[in-house]
Image (spheres, grey):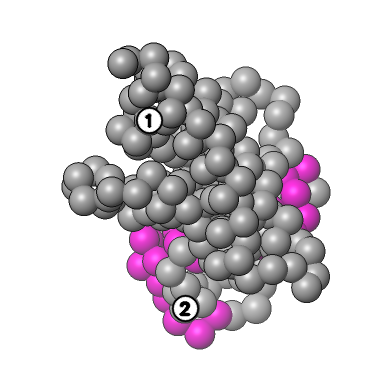
């Protein structure tokens, strides 16, 4: 999320410059992301966000009608970042230039590690959200992860010749493995480097995927 300057007159401390509407929205998203990531949805109020952003509550509510609307906008932003990272990882497959299935799996794992490295605790808004009371909210929070899994499933079909349904199952398992390793690395002091972590998980995952490649070849011959 692109940083923007502080801005607009309000009842609290005076900010040095006014922001355009789009800049204000980005600033509020950035502030909310930091608070939701560190404190959790249920422990953050709109007052907290307004105070941290140095705006009045009416300004905040002009951009986001409720705390849930603001939370879901933050989640959508994180989701777009995740999908962009996944798309970049699988681009060689989509272009038909990837020859090594293990390299494809490694690229997918590295994509998750890269995303978590960049997003930090904000990645938990997608992977470990505490907004579970509302079915619509749960679905929205999980939307980006489902899209990423679908994208990866398309790649798995290309490198294994599995059916679409089988590829979606394998994709879900690979995503869970990559997410878990990336979050472990972020939280574990002295953990392995991004490259080492990606290589280890890719080797583990590819051992299973390679077996599926052989199985599918045997079935179709």
Residue under label 1, please give it: 160
Write down the quadrant of residue 39 in the picture. bottom right
In this view, 97 is above or below 7 = above
Residue under the image location 59 percent in, 80 percent down: 14
| Element at label 2 | loop
Q: What element carries label 1?
A: helix
Observer-nearest residue: 124 or 32? 124
- The residue that appears at 57% across and 50% down in the rendered structure is 203
Measuring 68% from the left and 47% from the top, which residue is drawn there?
Answer: 180
Q: Residue furthest bottom?
A: 16
Range covered by the magenta-colored residues: 15-42
Alpha carbon distance from label 1 to label 2 = 49 Å
Task: Provide residue 55's location: percent of width, then percent of height.
Answer: 58, 66
| Residue 155 in the image: above or below residue 163 | below
Depth order, front residue of 151/120: 151
Q: Please check the rendered image and state whether residue 98 is part of the magenta-colored stretch, yes or no.
A: no
Q: Residue 134 carries which label?
A: none
Residue ID at (47%, 28%): 212
- The x and y percentages for residue 43 are 80, 49
Report the quarter where the C terminus lies. top left
Provide the residue designation for mark 2: 5
Q: Where is residue 169 in the image (x, y as percent from the top left)?
A: 52, 23
Q: In the rendered image, is residue 63 in sight? A: no
Main SS of the magenta part reads helix
Residue nearest the observer in this picture, 101 or 178: 101
On screen, residue 220 versus residue 38, left or right, reads left
């Amino acid at each position: 999320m692109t940083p923007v300057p502080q801005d607009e007159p309000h009842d609290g401390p005076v900010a040095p410059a006014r922001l355009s509407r789009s800049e204000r929205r980005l600033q509020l998203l950035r502030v909310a992301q930091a608070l939701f990531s560190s404190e959790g949805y249920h422990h953050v109020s709109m007052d907290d966000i307004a105070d941290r952003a140095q705006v009045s509550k009416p300004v905040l509510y002009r951009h986001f009608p409720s705390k849930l609307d603001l939370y879901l906008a933050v989640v959508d932003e994180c989701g777009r970042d995740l999908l962009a990272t996944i798309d970049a990882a699988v681009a060689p497959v989509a272009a038909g230039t990837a020859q090594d299935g293990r390299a494809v799996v490694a690229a997918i794992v590295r994509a998750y590690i890269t995303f978590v490295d960049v997003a930090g605790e904000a990645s938990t808004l997608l992977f470990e959200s505490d907004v579970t009371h509302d079915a619509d909210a749960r679905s929205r929070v999980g939307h980006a992860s489902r899209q990423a899994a679908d994208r990866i499933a398309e790649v798995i079909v290309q490198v294994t010749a599995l059916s679409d349904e089988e590829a979606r199952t394998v994709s879900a398992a690979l995503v869970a493995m990559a997410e878990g390793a990336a979050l472990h690395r972020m939280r574990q002091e002295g953990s392995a480097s991004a490259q080492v972590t990606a290589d280890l998980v890719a080797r583990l995952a590819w051992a299973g995927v390679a077996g599926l490649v052989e199985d599918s070849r045997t079935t179709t011959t």
